[in-house]
Image (spheres, helix red, strand yellow):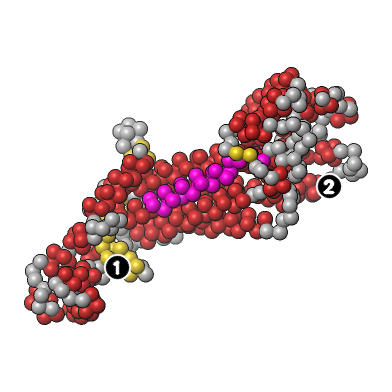
Amino acid sequence: MSAHQNSTPSHNQLDTKAEAWSALFSEPMSDLVKRYTSSVFFDKRMWQADIQGSLAHAEMLAAQKIIAAEDFAAIQKGMAQITAEIEAGSFDWKLDLEDVHLNIEARLTQLVGDAGKRLHTGRSRNDQVATDVRLWLRGEIDLIEGLLKELQRSLVEVAEKNVDVILPGFTHLQVAQPVSFAHHLLAYVEMFKRDAERMLDVRKRVNVLPLGSAALAGTTYPLDRERVARTLGMEGVSQNSLDGVSDRDFAIEFTAAASLCMVHISRLSEELIIWMSQNFGFIRIADRFTTGSSIMPQKKNPDVPELARGKTGRVVGHLMGLITLMKGQPLAYNKDNQEDKEPLFDTVDTLKDTLRIFAEMIGGQVNPATGAKEGGITVNQEAMRAAALKGYATATDLADYLVKKGLPFRDAHETVAHAVKLATMKGVDLTELPLAELQAFNPNIEADVFEALSLEGSLNARNTLGGTAPAQVRAQLARHQARLG
Ligand code: ARG
């Protein structure tokens, strides 16, 4: 096999970028162009994926007798040393060598000579980078999935303690009907559950191997792509080389899923901010998630939820960036694709930090001395209850009561509107109107109306699947507890 022959001595090391390509280039890049085109200072974070992919490729090259077994052994040895150097922080990353791939390959060749130069047989940086991004992202998705579970657990733990705590539910941010605080929190658990499902679905399309597509058209060497996929734990092999090197759908899909997850975080943030304002006073978050004001000594600002709301814009911006990056690209690989990394990396970092901090801010953290969680949100159930008693939150219950007495719903609705008008004029709640006054609106009203108009009566009555009745909320909790383990 020709790849076994010794190569010309002039190219033993790749030290500058002009040398990295070939004798074809007559002048080196200017420093500005080097800085502009290089990616090593951000893509070096994929070094583990790059080495993992290279080792799987080299193992297959040896198994297929495209390179000698000794070459594979030398590559393994060299990569072990490179791993140690990177981990120790002594690896000399060179801007001149453009990206993580060329840096590692050049060092390998420095360490093991010709075997290092044989690694790139049947491979291009185009299929290499696509493989590396996928391997790296797969690992991050798994971490994100775990963090989404943690956040759901935190919400479920707080919900468990607050099934019978009642607050006003809002529509249009106007008091609508009373709901259980646990029910409200579990709405977010549903959102984060869907986010986790979306991540796992995206993972399937991330976990496909492009390696073997080579530059764009496939390669002349008898590669065993399925073998490489198996070694890397990938679920399949890309079926078209042009698509293999140029597809970044998986990055867009991931960022879309991350954006939606951040939108959920942002909505929760908005509620936390409202709930902890003095006008509501429903909750407190631990001091370590807040900051003071340099001028107003009484202030405690919800910086963490505010920042999370702000960072949502940043992640959604990355989605716009990535989707726009792809829109004008002809097949196959274009250097534009190098711009996929920073938005993707920043999306992963932002999402992971946000999920981690929210799980702790809501659920607290384990005190090693007691094994119990401490420092999560503090609930002021009196304030919630007082707010639920304002704004005629149980007016619908009076209408439903009248329907049960035989009134058509539309008439009942009208009758209750009159009752609410009277109560508003008198500045009292519906339950504070004497029975005789209520009976003036409809003679079928009896003393049991006060039970129907109570907050607990209102909740208990909503006992359909997914409703806010405590029995239903407990059933929801049980479903999540079984699922989350
Ligand atoms: N750093 C490049 C990227 O991130 C690697 C692939 C370069 N391929 C090429 N043909 N120039 O996409």
Q: Is residue 462 visible?
A: yes
Q: Is residue 83 magenta?
A: no
- Where does the magenta region start and end? 189-210
How many discs mark residues in the rendered view? 2
Q: Residues within 10 Å of mark 2 (few under 14, many from 20)?
A: few
Residue 30 marker: 2
For residue 230, side relative to residue 427 (left or right):
right
Mark 1 or 2, nearer chain start? 2
Secondary element at image label 1: strand
- Give the camera-side residue of 365 and 161: 161
Q: Give residue 114's quadrant in the image.
A: top right
- Name the amino acid type tagged 1: Ala
Task: Tell which tag, 1 or 2, sits nearer the viewer.
Answer: 1
What residue is drawn where x is 37% and y is 69%? 172
Residue 443, image x and y in percent?
9, 78
Residue, disc 1: 176
Residue 190, image x and y in percent?
38, 52
What residue is drawn where x is 34% and y is 49%? 377
What residue is drawn where x is 21% and y is 76%? 408
- Give the camera-side residue of 413 and 214: 214
